[in-house]
Image (spheres, rainbow, N blue to C red):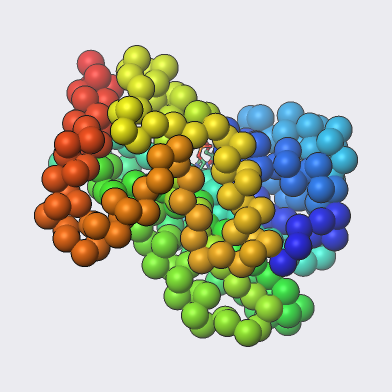
């Protein structure tokens, strides 16, 4: 599906680092956007920026942890845009913490925002996408959903769920004009990762590196316009490691340990506790 000024887009997590960048590059195409976040204090600023860049935007504060928030988001998007061609499930939260030390509600919140909201929004929008014979769902996953680092259990589980959800959607709706893609970024120099660096004084392990936010924007256009199943965003190619994890899980695990992937998040968890 080509993204242009006729594309009606529902973008969640629009007030954060990656979401704000996506809103800006979509605005440059003249797209019409419904921006969603919670509490969403910066949504008005992002709306203004979209309009300055040549796009059109409305916004809604909605808590995607709840069914009411999801229902309100879909109702408002359909009312204002008259339909949705591109749903970008980008809203996400994380806690870096030993699993047994998390509150049960934290576990549920991560699953609800990162995975369940994406599934609910998609479920509610699919009938209208199928009726118009045009639609694409982009799920913002993470390499965390594949590598599953230490102290990231709910986050990794939610992001792995998004990958399976995307692949199943593609299989079900093949040939209907409706499709889905998943984007798996490693560390991206904005939002969650930038805050993590500021709060702990740490930087991503050298063997993983970090990407500029622009790389996620490029991935979005590639995913939608080429109808790709998944796009991995990382400065160092990660597919060989991911393939090895599938083929030889113990070797893959040893490599992630050697690259410092688990130690990094364990140290982050310790520093955040102090
Ligand atoms: N940055 C990275 O290194 C990185 C790497 C891989 C994947 N990702 C993924 O990319 C996505 C965006 O990450 P980011 O780094 O840009 O994070 P961010 O700056 O923290 O932005 C997260 C966005 O989600 C919104 N949100 C949080 N809870 C919500 C809720 N209950 N209901 C509705 N919206 C909610 C936030 O709203 P408020 O602004 O109002 O809080 C914000 O707009 C996430 O799914 C994340 O997992 C990020």
- Horizontal arrangement in the rendering, residue 63 relative to residue 125 (left or right): left
Residue 135 vs 37, above or below: the answer is: below
**Residue at (14, 45) in percent of width and height:** 254
Residue 274: image x %, image y %?
23, 16
Residue 194: image x %, image y %?
46, 25
**Residue at (35, 22) in percent of width and height:** 203
**Residue at (57, 40) in percent of width and height:** 215
- The quadrant of the image that shows the N terminus is bottom right
**Residue at (32, 53) in percent of width and height:** 240
Q: Name the foreground residue: 254 vs 4.
A: 254
- Horizontal arrangement in the rendering, residue 125 relative to residue 142 (left or right): right
Residue 57 visible within the image: no
- Horizontal arrangement in the rendering, residue 83 relative to residue 150 (left or right): right
Q: Quadrant of residue 48?
A: top right
- Horizontal arrangement in the rendering, residue 133 relative to residue 150 (left or right): right
Residue 205 vs 1, above or below: the answer is: above
Residue 73: image x %, image y %?
65, 56
């Amino acid at each position: 599906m080509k993204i242009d000024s006729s594309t009606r887009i529902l973008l969640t997590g629009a007030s954060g680092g990656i979401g704000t960048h996506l809103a800006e590059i979509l605005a440059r195409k003249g797209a019409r956007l419904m921006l969603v976040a919670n509490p969403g204090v910066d949504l008005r600023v992002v709306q203004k920026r979209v309009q300055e860049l040549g796009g059109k935007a409305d916004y809604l504060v909605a808590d995607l942890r709840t069914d009411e928030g999801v229902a309100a988001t879909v109702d408002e998007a359909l009312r204002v845009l008259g339909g949705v061609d591109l749903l970008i499930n980008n809203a996400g939260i994380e806690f870096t913490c030993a699993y047994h030390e998390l509150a049960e509600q934290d576990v549920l919140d991560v699953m609800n925002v990162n995975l369940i909201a994406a599934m609910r929004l998609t479920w509610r929008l699919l009938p209208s996408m199928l009726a118009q014979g045009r639609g694409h769902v982009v799920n913002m996953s993470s390499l965390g959903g594949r590598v599953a680092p230490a102290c990231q259990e709910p986050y990794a589980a939610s992001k792995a769920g998004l990958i399976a959800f995307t692949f199943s959607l593609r299989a079900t709706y093949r040939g209907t004009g409706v499709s889905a893609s998943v984007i798996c970024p490693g560390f991206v120099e904005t939002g969650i990762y930038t805050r993590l660096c500021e709060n702990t004084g740490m930087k991503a392990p050298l063997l993983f590196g970090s990407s500029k936010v622009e790389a996620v924007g490029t991935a979005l256009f590639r995913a939608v316009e080429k109808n790709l199943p998944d796009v991995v965003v990382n400065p160092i190619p990660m597919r060989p490691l991911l393939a090895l994890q599938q083929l030889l899980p113990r070797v893959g695990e040893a490599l992630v340990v050697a690259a410092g992937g688990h130690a990094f998040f364990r140290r982050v968890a310790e520093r955040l506790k102090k």
